[in-house]
Image (spheres, rainbow, N blue to C red):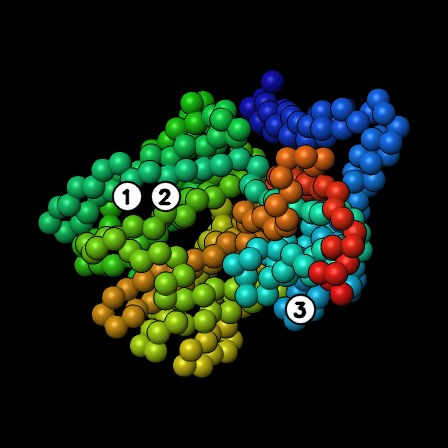
Amino acid sequence: MPSSSIDTFLASSVMIALVLSAMVSTTEILQPYLGDRSQRTFAERHYQLAKYLLLTTGTPAEWGSSPDTVPTSFGLALANSLHPYELDIDKVTRLNNESASSLTYPQLFASSGVYDVALRIEINTVFDLSTTLVSTLEEENETIYDFELYAERAGLPISAQLKCYIIIRDYIQNLTSSTSSTGTGSLQVSIPNSNNGTALLVAFAEIQPEIVTFNVHKFGHKSSTPEPDGTFMRLNPLDYMLAASLLYPDEEVLKAQIFTFNYSFNLTQVSGSNQTAEFEIPQLIDSSPMILVIAGFNGSSSFAEWVSYPQVPLEIGADLGESDVLSFPYIVSINNVLYDLTIESGGMIIDNIQKRTD
């Protein structure tokens, strides 16, 4: 069999396994309720609600791209999509509480239209990628960093192709690697010592097109430990625009960039003031999450802030406890990338919920 046919067969096998795993999980979750009619009706109602939230657009259909719009009915589907379980990138982003345009859970709950069911939604990449800095060697003109990467799903190792970027100030380095059948991979990075400050390792791992994950590792190069994410700037992507809110008066933007598995580009600034800047996000033809990075200075210190688009992983909803809770896992598509989505639902007291939403 030609190598291209083997690759296609393996890719198809991965897709089928992912879809079947979601279907089997749903069957196992519903199984305890299948014997009793009242319980079966209870489970079916929650199952149909979960499907409805993923297969309808909500009202208005484009509510996700308008930061001030609260949907009158809630739905995550992409408007005019030809495929089921294809979600809108902006509706998903607005479920992340770190987004400046995020919906609150009371808004989601009220727009769901079901006042006796509590909801929880969680979205993650299909598999995970971790990065660990294992050694640092400083030489006269450069510093060498050795990273270990590990790809896995549910504790099982995954062999994947890696595309990585090193970003510090306006310095960019592209690297490729892979993880073996044990899930492990290695990466050696050399950074000129003249570029001191906060550095980012942006790493993507791909099993096949549409099954891609990422990890962003922040570290200090020739400097102290970098500040936590969001220290210098709040980044909010929506409707293919990136809004940056500068948190200190002396901050200066050096460069804004977008990174995907196959591409990297500078972002074009379309507006700005002393404390804000707005950049256009290109609609790239690449099945990959997008990582948006802004590098800059705060006085004499350099920084690098980043955000993913869509802003996944995320979770929103009520604390459902452990009793009378159903969990419905799905494989969904967002901007041509597959993600794990789980909707949990449980019964609530109608009177209490009605009082909270009035």
Q: Quarter-wise, where is residue 294 in the image? A: bottom left
Helix, strand or loop for disc 2: strand
Could you tell me the amino acid type at mark 2?
Leu
Q: Nearer the viewer, residue 57 or 13?
A: 57
Q: How many residues crowd mark 3 within 10 Å: few (<14), some (14–19), many (20+)?
A: some
Left/right of residue 112 with respect to residue 227 in the rendered view: right
Q: Position of residue 26 (x, y in %)?
A: 72, 30
Q: How many residues crowd mark 2 within 10 Å: few (<14), some (14–19), many (20+)?
A: few
Name which of mark 2 and mark 1 comes first in the sequence.
Answer: 2
Residue at image location 56% in from the left, 49% down from the top? 314
Helix, strand or loop for disc 3: loop
Left/right of residue 43 with respect to residue 144 in the rendered view: right
Name which of mark 3 and mark 1 comes first in the sequence.
Answer: 3
Mark 3 or mark 1, whichever is nearer to me: 3
Q: Disc 3 versus disc 1: distance between alpha carbons?
A: 41 Å
In the picture, the disc for residue 175 is: 2
Helix, strand or loop for disc 1: strand
Q: Position of residue 3 (x, y in %)?
A: 55, 24
Q: Which image quadrant: the N terminus?
A: top right
Residue at image location 42% in from the left, 23% down from the top? 182
Q: Label 3: which residue?
A: 66
The reply to whether residue 325 is in sight is: yes
Task: Tell me, yes or no, whether the two marked residues, 2 and 1, touch with CB atoms within 8 Å.
Answer: yes
Left/right of residue 232 with respect to residue 119 in the rendered view: left
Residue at image location 65% in from the left, 71% down from the top? 68
Q: Quarter-wise, where is residue 93 in the image? A: bottom right
Q: Disc 2 versus disc 1: distance between alpha carbons?
A: 8 Å
Could you tell me the amino acid type at mark 1?
Val
Q: Which image quadrant: the C terminus?
A: bottom right
Mark 2 or mark 1, whichever is nearer to me: 1
Q: Position of residue 264 (x, y in %)?
A: 45, 55
Q: Label 1: which residue?
A: 189
